[in-house]
Image (spheres, rainbow, N blue to C red):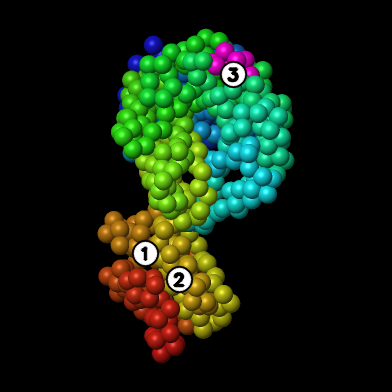
Amino acid sequence: MSQKTKLGIKELSPIDVYRLLPKTNCKECGFNNCMAFAAKLVNREVSVENCKPLLKKEHVNAYKQLKDMLKPAVKEIIIGTGDKAVKIGGKFVMHRHELAYFNPTCIAIDITDEMTDEEIIDRIKRTENFQYEHIGQTLRLDMLAVRSTSNSPEKFKATVKKVNENTRLPLILCSLNPEVLRAGLEAIPGARPLLYAVTKDNWREIADLALTYNCPVTVFAPNDIKLLKSLVKTLLEYGVEDLVLDPGTMYGEGLADTLNNFTMIRRSACKYGDELLGFPLLGVPMTVWMESASLAKEIVIWREACLAAMLMVRYADVLILHNIDGWALLPNIILRQSIYTDPRKPVAVEPGLRVFGTPDENSPVLFTTNFALTYYTVASDIESAKINAYLLVIDTEGTAVDSGVAGRKLTAEKVAESLKASGVENKVKHRKLIIPGKASRLSGEIEELTGWQVLVGPRDSSEIPKFIQEKWQIQR
């Protein structure tokens, strides 16, 4: 049993790591001493390789022990190569609040080898062009899954070649026929797609393909975790190490089993150190299209989106979808963003002075906090109203206005310091500062410390345009 399994994520402490470090306090890692570096390693904020002395020959055993101790419960797998590569898995904990989740769930859109060239190009373009700006991040889709519905090696090879030539995204090649998969791999040598899938009937042939082409492979055993583990053990002994697990995606009466299987697999890996189940999970919400043929298209799309959300929450690392309509995809990519933010670090923007439009010496000066959601909401309301203004973004360690005031992260002293450091007083001839309505209790202190006149603005940033129109002209 490995040191990591003995200790578990919760029991692992900086002392456990420190014992294996060189203890030279050389500072080459960027920290003042080895104990500080050990604390960062436990929190997975730095890599073992940052310790240069540890990489020397005399420390090779300690290095190997640390790598084993700190490895994730769910192995990280790379699909694709170079700029096309994506990482999946790499999870240390079952629950996000225990540490953080790494490598967001990849969403793949399917393409079949019986689609016309026009359909294929259209789906590629729609997948690649799908993007949405949210809280300062550009949210996108990640992969394309090429499915062989014809079971023809020649058709599949031509389709894979066409898709690969027209996309920057990594691929999943989907067929249970080894000869079809072989043809697809021949079309894109060196591309390292994810192969889907190994079963109890074809494992040897597809394992040979995975070893020959250096590809990760999906292990498929619908609603049978015992068989799944058996296949994993067989593949590992055969030499195939980069595996993805698909325990089956069932809807309707099988939904409960689907969610239970995903949960039990991730629990076994993260809570009990079961290394045969310590691999990324793949879900196929598009199976609802096969079970809902008699329903209206919109209902099936809605079902697929709901199933995708459930699987994402239940630890799926890859999802294969059929629908590409934005109204159904958008909620899930925002859900994914929310799940994969680091709970230890508030989502924040850089503090400082922001300029909107073309402000002059008479333009209003406002402030807000550097909590990303607050900042982008305020910025959007100012931009949409085409207001020429200066916005001072104050470092509140990523907290919102009301919580910042309550927790003393937003104080009159910080406002005064930020106002001075921003240089905005050299950009305007007035000395009037509009503060958020939720920070009204700071108005008196801000005036005393800065000498600026404080105007208490609205509690909701959507009312800023109206406030500027009605109050600023009068006050100026």
Tag 2: residue type? Asp
Q: In the structure shown, which secondary structural element does the residue marked by tag 2 occupy?
A: helix
Of the numbered discs 1 and 3, the one sitting upstream in the chain is 3
Q: Residue at x 71, y 39 (%)?
A: 162
Of the numbered discs 3 and 2, the one sitting upstream in the chain is 3
Q: Which mark is residue 381?
A: 2
Check the picture and name the quadrant holding the C terminus. Answer: bottom left
Q: Which residue is mark 3?
A: 206
Q: Which mark is residue 413?
A: 1
Check the picture and name the quadrant holding the N terminus. Answer: top left
Q: Residue at x 41, y 58 (%)?
A: 373
Residue 101 figure quarter: top left
Seen in the image, is 284 located left or right of residue 357?
left
- Residue 105 is situated, as x and y percent measured from the top left of the image, at 47, 39
Front tag of 1 and 2:
2
Q: Marks 1 and 2, Cα distance to the nearest angstrom?
A: 27 Å
- What type of secondary structure mainly makes up the magenta span? helix
Tag 1: residue type? Glu
Q: Is residue 330 above or below residue 20?
A: below
Q: Are marks 1 and 3 in contact (CB under 8 Å)?
A: no
What span is colored magenta in the figure? 202-210
Q: Which mark is residue 469?
A: none
